[in-house]
């Protein structure tokens, strides 16, 4: 599906580390070139944040993590890469010579991308070998979560390379925006910069503090900009009368003295001190790491909220989810499994947010892991995303869980599954949940799945190819003993004699 | 709690109707002055949208709806009002004489607020009676959902009136931002205007279309601005090195030619035509009413997502929710719970992230809601946080769920609980999950709770006061029939004859 297997990342700062996390969590191998002696630690911290966020973001089995390696040698990073992404300081005199070295070391077909937020691709590509494969892919922080990547070619960039870059960025869950023209600052940063200059004026003139300006955004227009931009917001505000009416009504404010952007505030020491002091006051005693996690949690929640409406960043997440489920299907079937034993098709790890007030994994997360085990079995027999698209699915109609032991945060878990019976409409299965390291049985779940046509929500017979697969498993496992706890009903013990 | 019972609204356009909806849904009576013969229809449409959004936004029982009346007479709107809010066209020659009439008709203590998005309060208040009670309260569209209201006094506005206005806007679920100084365009609109001017230049110069600009915002910086503003976003991006480092690194872009805001684009017919055509292309065949509902749905989901983190607009919503519940609580405790019936102790709403690939609530969320129901029962019998602190808890050892019907996003749910048996170490309970509006039974869950000493994780007898409470419930409910599905084991149906 994706021609890119290995990426070379030039620079391991905030942006480069974000690319590393996004790539590795999407199953790509990454070699990061960074001279910072602390590069490994910093990359690991960003990767930990990113893994945490991905587990919250998607229920889909995230790809097998790619390999991450740090090098001090730019040629080493570029030589084996299918895609090179440069995230070095925003300075042509730094970027141009290092891009030239990377391009010389890379295979001629390797795309050379740059994360520059504002330098012109025609200037950056001018001196590199095979300049037609150079393209800007400007991401936003945190790169592992933010969907937008602005794609911009220079004079020499080929159309084919632009298309390949768009496909690559899309394949790792991003939303590429192909630019029509190259321009300093591209689009998003020009909008951000205009707002930022106005914000600096407001602080400079003591109209508002940093915190008040942030509040004016996040309780107001920022909420709408999260899913509609400025044009659509205004159009909708214009109501039935439409955009022309809106422009006629509010056009005149363009002539009013509502911004000071006719010139640029001087970044004096006084202004700088004021901003730093206000920013410190706003951030309080919360550490940057905690702010990062709060930012990621909020981003994930906003995108998940929008996913329900299949709109904006929510539509990007929904498509990404589907791609992850589809990919998981591909790899699973290749693993050889002994069909006579309970099938081991699903693994998970206990996340901090799965812990309840007793300090153990909360009961509903047991069912979540069991449900993921059910989904893994269903994909295994071909009841996958394509099957759903054809209008069929299995619904759980009954579940019986026995909680045998508690489990704490970070434990590695796996589920084994025994098919106790299957007919054309039903699958009767029995899952066992283990703590993987000690192979301790934590819980069991017996469930009945009913095959349905999703349009009418009514039971119907499974497709023959699905039925034959599940019956083959049931037959192969028929010699296994009925697991302890199967067929059990809940009751109080008899009163003591 | 709130001194304001009745509001007089001058103008029933998009903003005035939004105020009417917010006030009426917060239990206030509103008289709207508008000369439009279609004012009633337009108000009813906005109110319908607002009610729809509120039902999704909060589980709390929304206040009894206030009365809404339309008048053509400005004195009629102002005379009986505890608070007058003016939302007339943005033109001093319209606002000033009408504000003067309203102030003359209103009681002297009545606050006169203005929704102006940019005119100066000192000029608007100059000629009115008792100018000290005039204040700007600048809201954002849709007024019934957007938290922000910029509060700004003029030269003559008293501090007491500012404080009363802040309290009033807060009491109807808004987030007042008190401005330090009066300034054309206040804060949020200055930021919006700066961005808007840049956006117009990008269209004017054919760098990007309206849709592309909106995409650059909503897949990028707009997502972050929904919960952090620009200063905190940059601070966090600066990482460990802090705000001074960030400013040092990115300060220089202020000198770069990244905006064209040194002057203002001329709104020629050509530019106007281009914007209208691009906006039409972007909006497609979706009607404005549908766009409005999508906007509201997205706003609600974003705020609900942030509520989980008690941050930004989510913190506003959480506090509002609590206030609504507290207000309702006064009434609830007076309702007698019939101890002979299944207890209704827990409600929930289906969140977007609870939805699986089938478009329904995923199975583990059923158990989450049931588990919350179990916790509610445990708190009800005194096995609460204090009890845990004493080293005791109940653990779920066995659960049997029957999934009877699917449920979609936003549905309101509640759980009723029957105690089937209890001894000193066990509680055997049976939950029923309903979709609250239609009282449709969605699922049942039978479970066995084991009382444990949390230090050793071993079963032990419950404290006498807890035991007596749960046994009292079991005795009171003893006459209820055993619920359908209790005591059930899972099995395949017998093969057909």
Image: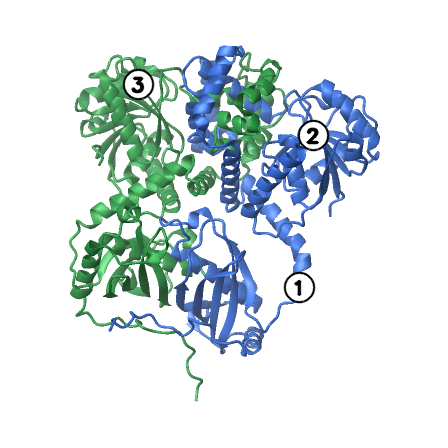
Chain colours: A green, B blue
- Residue mark closest to the camera, 1 vs 3: 1
Q: In this view, does A267 lie above or below B397?
A: above
Who is closer to the viewer here, A398 or B496? B496
Q: How far apart are marks 2 and 1 (CA)?
A: 41 Å
Q: Is residue B453 above or below residue A79?
A: below
Disc 1 sits on a residue from what chain? B
Mark 1, Cα crowd under 10 Å, few <14 / some 14-19 / many 20+, is few
Where is residue B490? Give x, y as percent. Answer: 33, 70
Mark 2, Cα crowd under 10 Å, few <14 / some 14-19 / many 20+, is many
User: Dot 1: what SS?
Assistant: loop
Q: Give the quadrant of residue A242.
A: top right
Marks 1 and 3 share the same chain: no
Where is residue A490? Give x, y as percent. Answer: 40, 74
Q: Distance between the residues labelled 2 and 3?
A: 50 Å
Q: Mark 1 points at which residue?
A: B335
Counting residues from the start of the chain, the first of labels 2 and 1 encountered is: 2
Whether pointer 1 and pointer 3 mark residues with C-beta atoms closer than 8 Å, the reply is: no
Who is closer to the viewer here, A277 or A253? A253
Residue B250 appearing in the image: no
The quadrant the C terminus of chain B occupies is bottom left
Where is residue B435? Give x, y as percent. Answer: 50, 57
Disc 2 sits on a residue from what chain? B
Q: Is residue A263 above or below residue A168?
A: above
Disc 3 sits on a residue from what chain? A
Residue farthest front in this picture:
B37
């Amino acid at each position: 599906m994706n021609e890119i297997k290995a990426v070379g990342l030039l620079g391991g700062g905030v942006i480069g580390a974000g690319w590393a996390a996004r790539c590795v969590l999407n199953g790509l191998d990454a070699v990061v070139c960074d001279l910072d002696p602390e590069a490994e630690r910093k990359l690991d911290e960003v990767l930990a944040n990113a893994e945490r966020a991905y587990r919250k973001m998607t229920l889909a089995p995230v790809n097998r993590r790619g390999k991450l390696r740090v090098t001090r040698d730019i040629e080493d990073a570029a030589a084996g890469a299918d895609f090179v992404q440069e995230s070095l300081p925003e300075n042509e005199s730094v970027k141009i010579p290092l891009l030239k070295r990377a391009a010389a070391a890379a295979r001629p077909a390797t795309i050379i991308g740059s994360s520059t937020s504002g330098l012109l691709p025609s200037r950056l590509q001018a001196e590199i070998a095979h300049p037609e494969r150079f393209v800007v892919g400007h991401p936003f922080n945190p790169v592992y979560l933010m969907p937008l990547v602005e794609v911009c070619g220079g004079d020499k960039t080929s159309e084919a390379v632009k298309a390949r870059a768009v496909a690559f960025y899309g394949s790792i869950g991003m939303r590429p925006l192909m630019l029509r023209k190259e321009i300093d600052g591209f689009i998003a940063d020009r909008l951000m910069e205009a707002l930022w200059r106005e914000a600096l004026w407001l602080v400079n003139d003591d109209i508002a503090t940093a915190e008040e300006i942030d509040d004016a955004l996040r309780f107001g227009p920022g909420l709408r900009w999260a899913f509609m931009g400025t044009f659509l917001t205004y159009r909708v505000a214009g109501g039935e009368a439409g955009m022309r009416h809106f422009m006629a009504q509010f056009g005149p404010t363009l002539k009013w003295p509502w911004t000071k952007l006719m010139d640029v505030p001087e970044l004096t020491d006084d202004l700088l001190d004021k901003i730093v002091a206000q920013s410190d006051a706003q951030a309080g005693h919360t550490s940057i790491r905690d702010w990062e996690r709060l930012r990621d949690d909020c981003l994930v929640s906003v995108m998940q909220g929008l996913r329900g409406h299949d709109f904006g960043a929510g539509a990007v997440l929904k498509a990404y989810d589907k791609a992850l489920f589809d990919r998981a299907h591909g790899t699973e079937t290749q693993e050889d499994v002994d069909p006579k034993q309970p099938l081991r098709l699903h693994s998970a790890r206990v996340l901090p947010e799965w812990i309840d007030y007793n300090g153990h994994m909360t009961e509903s997360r047991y069912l979540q892991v069991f449900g993921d085990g059910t989904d893994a079995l269903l994909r295994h027999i071909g009841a996958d995303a394509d099957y759903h698209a054809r209008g069929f699915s299995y619904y759980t109609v009954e579940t019986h869980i026995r909680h045998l032991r508690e489990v704490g945060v970070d434990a590695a878990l796996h589920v084994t599954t025994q098919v106790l019976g299957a007919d054309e409409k039903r699958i009767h299965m029995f899952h066992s949940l283990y703590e993987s390291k000690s192979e301790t049985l934590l819980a069991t779940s017996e469930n009945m799945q009913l095959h349905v046509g999703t349009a009418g929500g009514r039971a119907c017979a499974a497709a023959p190819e699905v039925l034959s697969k599940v019956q083959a498993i049931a037959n192969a496992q028929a010699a296994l003993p009925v697991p302890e706890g199967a067929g059990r009903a809940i009751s109080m013990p008899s009163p003591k004699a």
